[in-house]
Each structure stands twice: as structure tokens, then as C-alpha cells.
Image (cartoon, grey):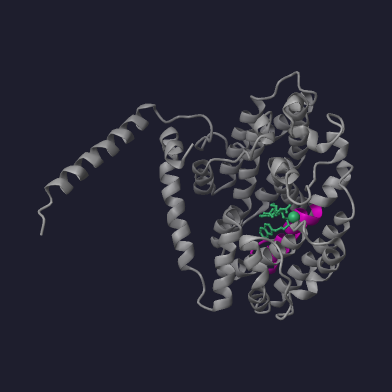
């Protein structure tokens, strides 16, 4: 369904979408004049639309550090993700990448499209990195070293057990959480959060991605990318790729529900991490991706379309989340709403139904006990009266009639 169709179906998206476009336009104006910084910020927008907008709303000093942190790790991940690079070439680069970021002459071409541009002009990122404060450089190098080593380990090792799965997600996302908490602390705006909470922030996002991107990853050319742990999928099928075949749909959806239920483990830590933050811009930067994640999990749960194509939140709802998320009350509200949405899809015949419901009820309990639920707008309970869409349509028809009339009677000079 095109954007126009989606807007007519969800007219409440119009204002947030317009607001989002204005914020994006404003962000573009903030791009620094120096060519290497201009490259970094334009590249940030090209390789990550979702994080680019929330990074842009951070204060200048922290924004530059987080922007470079993102591009350094995205470059490292581009090496990891390029399945055409032979292992004996890839592993040494992953292990030494934390040293390469200091060397403006270092270059390794790989990846496709914008990722390839990032790699080919990576010297711009190194130049900007070397301009960051000492504390920021140390935190970024430390995380890059640990993530490179973790990625190298799993180039040679399959994700078998759930412990392997948590370990892999720690390396590629948990460490990002730990690094961000260090950057927030180095900026003097936040206390240093406990590693366990920072790690959970990353695992909740990464596991949501791994679940949502099942089909894209398993169909990756030349080699499949497989992150679902054998300990879970082997209860439903003999091979991970069997989940995508029509005849295995019932087992596939049960396996999907098992994976979603596993990801829900990290909800409490995520809510605790967010409730400790003090700086409003840092709060929004951390909260918006988490709300997108619980929303995406609610859409993926019990949804066979995950094995048919990519299930994504509609742009209008994304705009609403970005527009409406300002306080912890908004976060409790969103987690409560999307938990209700997920709960409404739990079928008691599902093998994990009891576990799924208990984790949802635990999260809903902490949201209720926050006492923040009543003062907020809901993401799912449609409270706008049905006549609004009709009015908007009429308005547009009127506008086009006036326009047609004016253009018809415009005096020809
Ligand atoms: C607060 C706010 C943002 C947070 C956070 C806490 C904790 C963790 C994260 C963001 C990271 C979440 C990662 C989820 C998306 N997954 C990926 O991008 C995978 O690549 C992981 C390795 C590179 C990590 C790059 C990254 C991502 C977000 C950042 C950041 C660095 C630095 C600062 C802020 C946000 C995925 O990549 C998909 C792709 O290639 O597009 C993969 O390859 O598995
Ligand atoms: Mg990767």
C-alpha cells in the first residue's frame, strides 16, 4: 500500500510525517562545513535513516562522538557482513580494525552501495575521529576492539545455543550499549549505567532485527546469514532454512513465537535503563529505537509474513513514535500498548503461550505501577472519530476544485 494509501487509512499520521520531514530538513542544515564532517553526517543519513534522526537531536559534542562511533562500527560491520570476503582476509581485518581507525591512509574496499562509499572514503571518518576528545576516542577504540574480536570468533563458529545467541548479540549490539553509556558519562550528562542494563538495550534491538530479517538473511548471496540459535529452531525443523517453506508454516510460526518470547526477556532491563536517564535529548535518543523494537516484535509475533517478506512498521507510525516520545510516561504507555497488541495475538495452543503471557504481564505490571498510563495518547486504541478521514478527503477535493478553477481562470500574460 503506497504512502498515500497508508495516510488515508491512518490520517493521524499526517502531522507527525510532516513534522518528521521538517526535522530531517533542519538536520540537513546542521551539517558542519568541514568536508570530512560533511561527509560523515551525509553518510550517516545514507546508511542509517532510523538512527540518523535520533543522533541529530543530541547536543553538538555528544552528537559528533556518537556519529563517529556509529560510522566506525558500521564500517566494521560492513566487513563482517560482506559474505564474499574470504575468511583468512576478513578475520585479520576485524581483529585489527581498532588500530586502523587511527590511520588515515588505511583503506579496504568492500560492501555495496552506500556501505561501499563509506569504506572507500573511510579516511574522512578517521580524520573526524582524531578530532574527538581523548575520552571519546578511548571508549570508541575499546568497543571497536572487543566487537571486532567477537565478530571474528563467530565467523568461525555457528550460533548453536541460546548462550551463543546472547554472546553474539552482546558483541554486535550489547557492546554498542556499553559504549554509548561510556560516551554519555564522558559528556558529563549522565551517570555511568550498569553494564547489564546497557547490554540489554543492545540485545533487545539486535534480537528484534534478527527476527524481522530472517528471510533477507537466509536468502543472502553468496552465503546465507544465520543467527537464529539451533537450540530453538531444532525443536521445530531439521534445517533453519526449512522455516521459509509453505508446508512448514505452522511449525515456522511456533518457532517465530519462541524467538519473540526470548527477546521479551530484555524488556525490564530496557525500561530500568531508560527510567534512570536524566538528559531529555539522550533519553529520546535511547527511547525511540526501543519503542520501535517492541512495536516491531508485536507486528512479527504469530505473523507468517515474516517468512514471506520483511515485516516493517509503517512510516506514519514511526513518525508518531518519534513525535510523541518525550517522557518516561510515553515509554510506559507505548510498551503497555504494544504488549496489549502482542497479547491479543497469543493463542493458547502455542507451545510457548504461558511463557509469552507471563513476560508480557510482568512488563505491563511495571508500566501500570509507574502510574503514568492514564496521561498519554495511545498507539493502538483508535480514539479519533471516524468522520475525520472523510473531512480530510473532502478538504483535498475542495482544494483541487479551487486550484482547478483558479488555474482555469488565470489571465494569460
Ligand atoms: C541506546 C541507543 C541506541 C543503541 C543502544 C542504546 C544500544 C545498542 C545499539 C543502539 C545498537 C543496536 C544495533 C541494532 C541494529 N543492528 C545492527 O546494526 C547490526 O550491526 C551491528 C554491528 C554494528 C553496530 C552499528 C551501530 C548501530 C547503532 C548505533 C551505533 C552503531 C552507534 C551509536 C548509536 C547507534 C546489523 O546490521 C544491519 C545492517 O548491516 O544494516 C547486523 O549486521 O547484524
Ligand atoms: Mg553484521
Q: Is 350 above or below relative to 110?
A: above
Residue drawn where x is 54% and y is 60% of the image: 57
Residue drawn where x is 57% and y is 72% of the image: 39
Q: Is residue 362 left or right of residue 14?
A: right
Q: Is 70 above or below relative to 345?
A: below
**75 or 87: nearer the viewer:** 87
The x, y position of residue 285, in whole percent, is 60, 55
Q: Is 74 above or below relative to 256?
A: below
Name the quadrant containing residue 388.
Answer: top left
Q: Is 174 above or below relative to 310?
A: below
* Magenta range: 170-190
**128 or 367: nearer the viewer:** 128
Q: Is residue 126 magenta?
A: no
Q: Is residue 182 magenta?
A: yes
Q: Is residue 383 left or right of residue 346?
A: left
Residue 194 visible in image: no
**272 or 393: nearer the viewer:** 393
Magenta span: chief secondary structure: helix
Q: Quadrant of ligand 1?
A: bottom right
Amino acid at each position: 500500500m503506497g504512502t498515500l494509501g497508508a495516510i488515508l487509512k491512518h490520517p493521524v499520521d499526517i502531522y507527525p510525517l510532516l513534522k518528521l520531514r521538517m526535522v530531517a530538513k533542519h538536520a540537513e542544515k546542521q551539517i558542519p562545513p568541514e568536508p570530512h564532517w560533511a561527509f560523515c553526517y551525509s553518510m550517516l543519513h545514507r546508511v542509517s535513516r532510523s538512527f540518523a534522526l535520533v543522533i541529530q537531536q543530541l547536543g553538538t559534542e555528544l552528537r559528533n562522538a556518537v556519529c563517529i562511533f556509529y560510522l566506525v562500527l558500521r564500517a566494521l560491520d560492513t566487513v563482517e557482513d560482506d559474505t564474499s570476503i574470504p575468511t583468512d582476509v576478513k578475520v585479520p581485518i576485524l581483529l585489527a580494525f581498532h588500530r586502523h581507525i587511527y590511520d588515515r591512509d588505511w583503506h579496504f574496499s568492500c560492501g555495496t552501495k552506500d556501505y561501499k562509499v563509506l569504506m572507500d572514503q573511510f579516511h574522512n571518518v578517521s580524520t573526524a575521529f582524531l578530532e574527538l576528545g581523548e575520552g571519546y576516542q578511548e571508549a570508541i577504540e575499546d568497543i571497536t576492539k572487543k566487537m571486532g574480536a567477537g565478530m571474528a570468533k563467530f565467523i568461525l563458529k555457528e550460533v548453536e545455543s541460546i548462550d551463543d545467541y546472547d554472546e553474539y548479540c552482546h558483541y554486535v549490539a550489547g557492546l554498542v550499549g556499553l559504549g554509548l553509556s561510556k560516551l554519555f558519562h564522558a559528556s558529563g550528562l549522565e551517570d555511568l549505567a550498569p553494564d547489564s542494563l546497557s547490554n540489554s538495550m543492545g540485545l533487545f534491538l539486535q534480537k528484534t532485527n534478527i527476527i524481522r530479517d530472517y528471510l533477507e538473511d537466509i536468502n543472502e548471496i553468496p552465503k546465507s546469514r544465520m543467527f537464529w540459535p539451533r537450540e530453538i529452531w531444532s525443536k521445530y525443523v531439521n534445517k533453519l532454512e526449512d522455516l521459509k517453506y509453505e508446508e512448514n508454516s505452522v511449525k515456522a510460526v511456533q518457532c517465530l513465537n519462541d524467538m519473540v518470547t526470548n527477546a521479551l526477556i530484555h524488556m525490564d532491563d530496557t525500561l530500568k535503563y531508560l527510567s534512570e536517564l536524566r538528559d531529555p535529548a539522550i533519553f529520546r535518543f535511547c527511547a525511540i529505537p526501543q519503542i520501535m523494537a517492541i512495536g516491531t516484535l508485536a507486528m512479527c509475533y504469530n505473523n507468517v509474513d515474516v517468512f514471506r517478506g520483511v515485516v516493517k512498521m509503517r512510516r506514519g507510525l514511526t513518525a508518531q513514535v518519534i513525535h510523541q516520545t518525550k517522557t518516561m510516561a510515553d515509554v510506559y504507555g507505548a510498551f503497555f500498548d504494544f504488549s496489549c497488541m502482542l497479547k491479543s495475538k497469543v493463542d493458547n495452543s502455542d507451545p510457548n503461550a504461558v511463557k509469552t503471557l507471563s513476560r508480557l504481564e510482568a512488563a505491563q505490571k511495571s508500566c501500570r505501577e509507574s502510574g503514568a498510563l492514564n496521561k498519554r495518547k495511545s498507539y493502538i486504541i483508535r480514539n479519533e472519530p471516524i468522520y475525520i478521514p472523510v473531512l480530510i478527503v473532502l478538504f483535498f477535493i475542495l482544494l483541487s476544485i479551487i486550484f482547478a478553477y483558479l488555474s482555469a481562470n488565470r489571465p494569460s500574460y
